[in-house]
Image (tube, coloured by chain):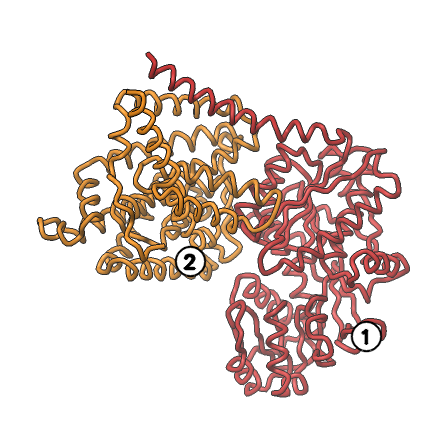
Chain colours: A red, B orange
Amino acid sequence: MKVIQKAYGRRAVTRAMLGAMALGPSMAGAARAQSDIKIGLTTDLTGIAASYTRSTVNGVELGIDEVNAAGGLLGRKVALLVRDSQLKPDLGTTHTRDLITREKVDVLIGPNSSAVGLTVSAVARQYQKPVIMTTPNTPRLPMELFHPHFFTLVPSGLMEARAMAEVMGPKGKKFAFIGGDYEASHQGLKFFKERLAKVNPGAEFITEAWPKLGEPDYTSYITKLASAKPDVLFSYLWGADLVGFIKQAKPYGLFNRTAVGTLLFMDDLKALGQEMPDGIWGQMRAPFFAMPGDTASRFVERYRAKYNDYPADFAIMGYEAVMAYAGAIKDAQSVESAALVKALEAGTFDLLRGRTRFRQLDHQGDVPSFIGKTAAGDKVPFKVLAEVERVPADKIWPSEAEVLEARKAK
Amino acid sequence: MTAQPLPPLQPAAGSAALSMRTKTVIVGGLIIGLYLLPFVLGESYLFLSIDFLIMALFAVSYNLLLGQAGMLSFGHAAYYGLGAYTVAILFNKLAVPVYIGLLASPFIAGAIALAVGWFAVRVTGMYFAMLTLAFGQLLHTVVMGWYGFTGGDDGLPVMPPDWLLPARNYYLFVLTVTLVSLAALRLITLSAFGTALNAIRENRQRAIFVGLGVRNYELGAFVIAGAFAGIAGAMRAPLQQMAFPSLLHWSQSAEPVLMALAGGIYTFAGPIVGAAIFVFTNFVITTYSEYPLLVFGVIVLLVVLYLPGGVAGAVIAAWERLRRRAR
């Protein structure tokens, strides 16, 4: 009998402890200002993309500070809750669920990596919470995995590759490719080739190089590319890989003979500094030095004043996500999901990259792709892009038929 | 961690410490408590509890190798990940619902474990650890690179049916599958087969000498452990609504090792306790700070230094002392 009592005692203790765990934090949550509008941001603060993620969080924070300084939304303050998914899709799900079910966030902003982005989007679908993606851009998100609560402000990988083909396509006959051996890169080349066949039917690919992600030594790839003597090189390298490749390829004169077009982030420009050769065609998502109008230049000043740094593409897109939510919440006069989705679909938002609408079909923001030539910057201590061309979204995004086809195939 | 021989505890410390009836009552109480949990816990903690149940099965399946047979495998996540991909691929390619995919997962994971194990059990100790690590990374690379079949590095989405989506339903589903699996693993550890594994761990030479087909026993343990890890992985994919390559990565393989060591490798419940510590610490730390593995690593270090039998081992030892004093 004594034994049984003990067993009950133990169970009761376990239950009490678990109960306290469930109640404790949620009571603390309730104690926080009940009326805050909460934005949940699950993103990859640790891992190889940490500096990009930092920029996103900075941009989002700045946006929220400004909204609050202007009196908040619907008379309520806006609060930000950040969680670290560490590039791990499982943590992406866990934290996003926690943000929704326990912290009761009203809206979500997406993470950094596409893999985590897929899980965050799946959770948003399950709980019917709006999510705006600012960095992950696998075309699977707006196409076959689309759901009504998903929105994106990044040009998808499909759009970027097509924009590149539009700009680089007419520059020669013989094409070469270098890109990290992973899915987005393989897809990027496929999309590029499809559009190239339309832009320049006579063009052909004469060589392809597939270094692994994080490759330290590009010598063999560079000699392979240089000996093929292509007119145009399409690069899907970015971050440390791109920096390493450019540094190592420069002495081979690859950039003198060949028109090189590559993905490019502000962090790469900063990392290369004056070592960046002139005349490389860089494709950027949101270059701060090529934003139109005063709003953008004032944003850059405020960002520099707060963080003592230039705003990376990711900071601008994060800031814009907050602006889009702010606009939609004002339009809807509500943070309730269904009303907000309607307002996001219907609204036109004045963002740093220009006036932006989300397309009804796939909630893809009609953001352009920026492609320009590297050149010395007169106001910043690193190279920037000159002669920047804005390839408009409606020239590069998938047609309705393509989107529906992809959804049917799934 | 492996250079020193494992401390010679009597492997059946648990059964010596508690009478059969006490155990039945405790385990029965816990099971009832677990089934009542969804009616007490908030949704977020329920998801965390699902996470815990899956990790518990993963860790216990692994401990069949480490604790029972003394085989230090560094590639156990491969079978966990294969279980997840079995569900995801069957769902995406053949529209097989996840609960049917789950039934297939131990067979697929077990079959691959058989192929890998056939080579791996030919060596022991550090060589075995390295070989399992290498095979694990090989499988990870295949999954990562085979875009058409596995979806590559972005992973493969899994959509559970609507009735499995709510936290409470999925919790009850996972709890049932986990309990059945744990019961099966428990029977295996207590069987003649399990006893033979103990003998191999204690003294491999002597086990060979008394006529045990040591390699076959080790291969058997490897396949069974892989199959149950596959079930754990198969429950993971619907929880994350996705299968992704990092489930097979070596860093994932480190987790059951840490969980088993923290909880205690000489008791059946040890890895379950370790999984609880791991899952809850990981959640709290990634919510409020960075570097979760650093914190968990320190916990394991402290446990290994001060509680060589793990948390569960220490609790049972303390219980023993109390009882002796009471008498």
Q: Position of residue A71 (x, y in %)?
A: 88, 39
Same chain for marks 2 and 1? no
In this rendering, the count of numbered labels is 2
Q: Secondary structure at mark 2?
A: helix
Residue B140, which numbered label? 2
Q: Quadrant of residue B123?
A: bottom left
Side of A409 where A231 appears, left or right: right
Q: Residue at x 84, y 42 (%)?
A: A68
Circle 2 crowding by C-alpha within 10 Å: few under 14, some 14–19, many from 20: many
At label 1, which amino acid type do we have? Gly
Can residue A355 be seen? yes
Q: Is residue B172 above or below residue B87?
A: above
Q: Residue at x 67, y 37 (%)?
A: A129
Residue A191's disc number: none
Classify A342 as above or below A352: above
- Marks 2 and 1, how far apart at CA: 44 Å
Name the quarter where the N terminus of chain A is drawn.
Answer: top left
- Residue A243, how many percent across, how many down? 63, 73
* Callout 1 crowding tier (Cα within 10 Å): few <14, some 14–19, many ≥20: few
Kindly give the residue lying farthest to the right in the view shown: A294
In which quadrant of the rendered view does residue A190 lie?
A: bottom right
Extreme residue in the top direction: A1
The subunit letter for the residue under badge 1 reads A
Q: What residue is pinned by disc 1?
A: A377
Hey, what amino acid is under mark 2?
His
Residue B132 in the image, given as x and y percentages of width and height:
33, 58
